[in-house]
Amino acid sequence: MSGSAPAPVRAAGGGASPVKHWDDLRHRVMNDMGAMDPATLAQYVHVLASAQELNPQVLDAVGAHVSTSSLELLTPTAIAKILDAFGRYRHRHRDLFRAASHQILVAPGLSAKDALLIVNSCSRTGHKDAQLFECVARCLVGEVDHMQQADLCKCAWAFAKSGLLACLDTGPALLNAVLDRCLVLFHDPEKTTCFLKSNLLADLTWAMAVVASDIDRNTDCAKLVALVTRFLRPQLASLSPHSLSSLIWAIASTQAVTDDTSLFDHIGRLAEQAVPTMRSNASLATIAWSFAKLDIRHNGFFRAVTSLSPERWKLFRASDLNIMAWALSRSRPERAEQALGHIADCAVQCLSTFKNSELCGVLWSCTKVKPHDALLDAAATFLVPIVGFLSGQELATTIASFLKSPSNECRRRVLVELLDRAQRDIDKLSPNDLAMTIRAVGEAPDMVRFRAEVLERAVAFLMQKDPAFYASMWPCALADIAIGLAKSRRHIHQVFSAIAVPCAAKITGFTPDALVGAIDAFSVARIDHSKFMSKAGDRVAQIADQLSPAQLSIVMTALAQSMFFRDPDDPSFGAVLSALSTRLTSLTPVELMRVAWAICVVHPSRRQPASLDTFWSEAGPIIGGIGADDLTDPDDIERLNVIRRDRADQLGPGVIGSPGDVVFDASDTNSVWRQEIASILEYLQYNVKLSVQCEGSGYAIDVAIPSKRIGILLEGDEACGQLCHQPTGRTVMRRRLVARAGWRVIAMPSWKWAAQTDPELARSCLVKCIYDVL
């Protein structure tokens, strides 16, 4: 019998009967393969697979027969056809692929066409054989210039999918040649899209995004993705959901065409329409991840995702749950909290199927939005025995998760184990994992065990690093360091100065949340940060419409606080105020008061623009109605005092606070007492010389700081009573201190060391007092 497939069987009356033909052919393969010529069997299997007329039973039978009895009789072409049939169905027959790999390596005469079929089949079925792929790469590397465009796409996809590129000697050279050839071809539209299926083009973009770093050509790969995307744009509707996810993933991974909003709107609409019928949860998760990575909040798509039923969420694999949780926690669409609750419920039910990285990832993503008690408890029990085996990233994300809600003994136990390991292995964490750990621990309550040790080790480690260390960090990681140190009240001048330069250089890489957090942290630290703050202000002005009113309020306060480091007429402040002016009703009274304070600082009443009259007419009555019980932060008390002092005619009568409040020099309207004390503490850590004198029942400590002098009066019990309860006594104290012209004055009562006369003890008590106040 010849090696070609039999002619179709004709039904009575001359009409073709395809069903009968394929049934007969399958029956013949199943029953006669033992007596059949191996080449003929390979041809039959190839024809059935091309027509999608095979089934798992036939494939298993063919695989068992060929791998045990006739493989050595087959030519490389016949082997390629059989493997291609298995690849089309993604049916991995281990014995067949193992035997076929050995036969290909020892048999001569492998053609480029057969080699391409073989590696595609291996990649589709997950068969990884580095020797086989190296053999195929050597066969194909010289044929790249003669390949059809479809074969170039298939070649790139197969080697990228295999994950073996780093293990191959010839593989990188092959992919470099494919990339160069594709860049040439895709510059000529007439030679490209009319001959290629859109799904093949999407696979090409995915493959090049995967191998970009392996072949060290990220820029060229991004350029190719942009070119292919341009060709694909008219054909987007014809893409399958899987190919659509491959394309958007490639764009997100290479950061190609990130400014084409109409393209993403089109992709978002297509994805939104496909969500209800999309069978692949992995494709759905990939699209969500890509939109989140690109910071594109497509409302329609995310609305469809968050509307998925609990039953649908149960069908997601652990890896897909992790990816989807990250995307939702980053994008924060409407009803994200509800969807993350469903994800957390599913994670609890299938906890044993998670890898360590997946569990730590989904735990962090879900907890970042809202702590999920059931997931935290289940994860705590699961993680206790394996804390020592977690990677640096897993350790950092898990610490951040449990610090959100350490509310029971089991969680506290695993948290202690995590922090203990973090403080021991702080120098083994990657820069970005270290930054996440610093932020999580810095935001934690003081009473958390090992908190101080972790922060001290982290700060000591950071102070030893050179600029290249900070330059290698992600922008958001730099923000995490600043936020963590500011929240922990460790305003380390050396660290903040080191991160200011890379923060300024990478300002466009900050997410809105990270940018606002970094601005606030630098402002709280009260360190010369003009390198960062000037660019940060400009960046905020560019993205002001993406920030919430609360974030704009924080930025305005920070910019006003740092104005003495910058040009008072900097346009950034005006841009932020302009963006906020139409959303004042979204602010709480306290946030509105902070905005008003910032205006008072930047625009004294004698220079206030007429455009601010409208603001004061709307905000004045609200701020005037704030009472003492509405404010718990001493900073806010002082800010309100400044507003009442400078804008009394627009707020009406009223005094905030009590006779025991902290006293300031009336000539200085820009001081915020907690931040001033924080800056003093910073200088104390760098051995600023102090002049300590005994005044009455307390100490007056003069701190010499370049460009300003600060006087601090630490009162004893007797003077404290006068300061707190007798208005006349308070006046006397105030006059005595403010009499020193040009000094800024802070009075801190209520510390019981008035009888001491030791200056060193006074210094240590000052540090303790500052920590207590902060």
Image: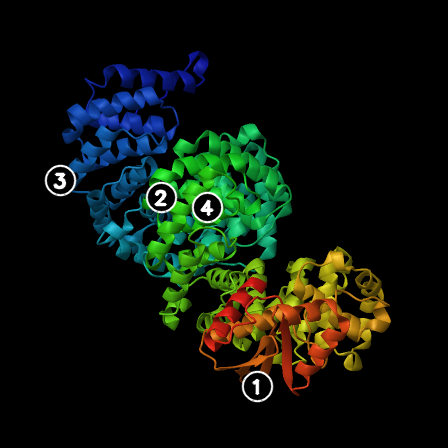
| Frontmost residue, 552 versus 448 | 448
Q: Looking at the image, which residue is at 44% across and 49% down? A: 399
Residue 418 lies, in percent from the top left, at 39, 47
Which disc is residue 106 wearing? 3
Query: What residue would you read off at disc 2?
Result: 387
Viewer-side label of 3, 2: 2
| Frontmost residue, 722 versus 230 | 722
Q: Secondary structure at mark 1?
A: loop
Crowding around mark 1 (Cα neighbors within 10 Å: few <14, some 14 to 19, many 20+) is few
Q: Residue type at mark 1?
A: Ser
Earlier in the chain: of badge 4 and badge 2, it is 4
Question: Is 576 on the left-hand or right-hand side of 431?
Answer: right
Q: Residue type at mark 2?
A: Val
Query: Whole-Å distance between the Cαs marked 3 and 2?
Result: 47 Å
With respect to residue 390, does 728 lie above or below?
below
Q: Residue type at mark 4?
A: Ser
Crowding around mark 2 (Cα neighbors within 10 Å: few <14, some 14 to 19, many 20+) is some
Q: Secondary structure at mark 3?
A: helix
Viewer-side label of 4, 2: 2
Q: Secondary structure at mark 4?
A: helix
Q: Residue type at mark 3?
A: Val
With respect to residue 534, does 65 lie above or below?
above
Query: Whole-Å distance between the Cαs marked 1 and 3?
Result: 81 Å
